[in-house]
Amino acid sequence: MPPLASVDIGSNTLRLLIAEGWTSGPLKPIRVERRITRLGERFLPTRILQPPAMARSIAALREFAQLMAENGVQDYLAAATAVVREAGNGAEFLRRVEEEAGLRVRLLSGTEEAELALRGAALVTAGGGAPIALFDIGGGSTEVIRQVPGGSPGVESVSLPIGVVHLTETFLRDDPPGLEACARLAGHVRAILEAVSFAAPLDRLLWVGTAGTVTTLAAMYLELQHYDPDRINGVVLERSWLVDLCNRLADTPVASRRAIVGLEPGREDIILAGALVILELMETFRFSRVTVSDAGLLEGLFLELCQRHRGLSLP
């Protein structure tokens, strides 16, 4: 089968996967690209995508379209997430993407985003028989989804207005922000999480984190000079390590964070907000360690595309 592709248009990062059509086993990537364009920059309080952010993102998507053509991609599935969902000019942005980059983009609901992320993460996550609870922390929202073995439906999910770009711009404006600002951010996130309830119990779950925040934290934990998905998958981050990291980052200026090994350039300002969100998830849902998955929404989109082409059932 000729190559297929998926594109994830996130609030902070745009990602591209070009791979051979999937039937079973691991995906066989031909090309994986990511561009931090900060589409959700200065989104609040107007809830309008800003012209510079749209221009950066469209330029990256135009580059993705060129890479797809160069690699002989037969079909693709591109999807946009939280910040485009909520934007007053989200439809205009998607129209411009089609006109200027030549890409048709599907706007995901929060539920679709969560379920696709879980399916993607399941490709690389060995639960040992335990049901999985997954969180996906993005620039504009956080999705939490859990498997319900034997239930109908088989998953429960929630999409929350917790995004690291918005949180950073609202609560961590000083440089360095200090512990008091971190406490205000944590309190805001806690209030949102405390209103969440799941019908199925949350005990005896394998908690898995996916997307750029948690994979970057794993790279920092491993002190990776070069990002390696195979080393990231399966890394376990403990609450105690995250607490120590947040305390250090709270008093470290953004420019100085650039020297931290494993911290992806472009995430220096938002990584603290992401780590604080994980700590609040741990506190609310009572778990103390998270297993990291490099796979998530991007891979879930790719699996759906393969299902469309081959009539496969998604895992």
Image (spheres, rainbow, N blue to C red):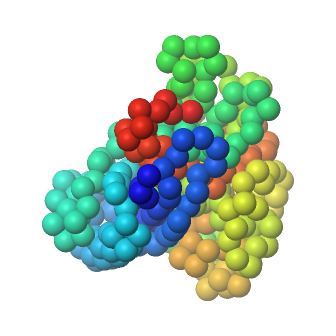
Decide: is 280 above or below 36.
Answer: above
Q: Position of residue 175 (x, y in %)?
A: 58, 78
Identified at 43% across, 58% down, the residue is 3
Identified at 72% across, 60% down, the residue is 230
Q: Is residue 251 visible?
A: no
The image quadrant of residue 252 is bottom right
Identified at 48% across, 43% down, the residue is 303
Compare residues 86 and 293 and report the one nearer the observer: 293
Compare residues 97 and 171 and report the one nearer the observer: 97
Q: Quadrant of the C terminus?
A: top right
Q: Position of residue 166 (x, y in %)?
A: 44, 60
| 155 relative to 72 in the view: left or right | right
Decide: is 278 above or below 7.
Answer: above
Q: Position of residue 225 (x, y in %)?
A: 74, 79
| 221 relative to 169 in the view: left or right | right
Decide: is 152 above or below 82.
Answer: above
Q: Is residue 311 visible?
A: yes
| 172 relative to 7 in the view: left or right | right
The image quadrant of residue 132 is top right
Label tally: 0
Identified at 60% across, 30% down, the residue is 146
Q: Work out which residue is located at the far front of the displayed protein and give it.
A: 1
Compare residues 42 and 227 and report the one nearer the observer: 227
Q: Position of residue 72 (x, y in %)?
A: 37, 66
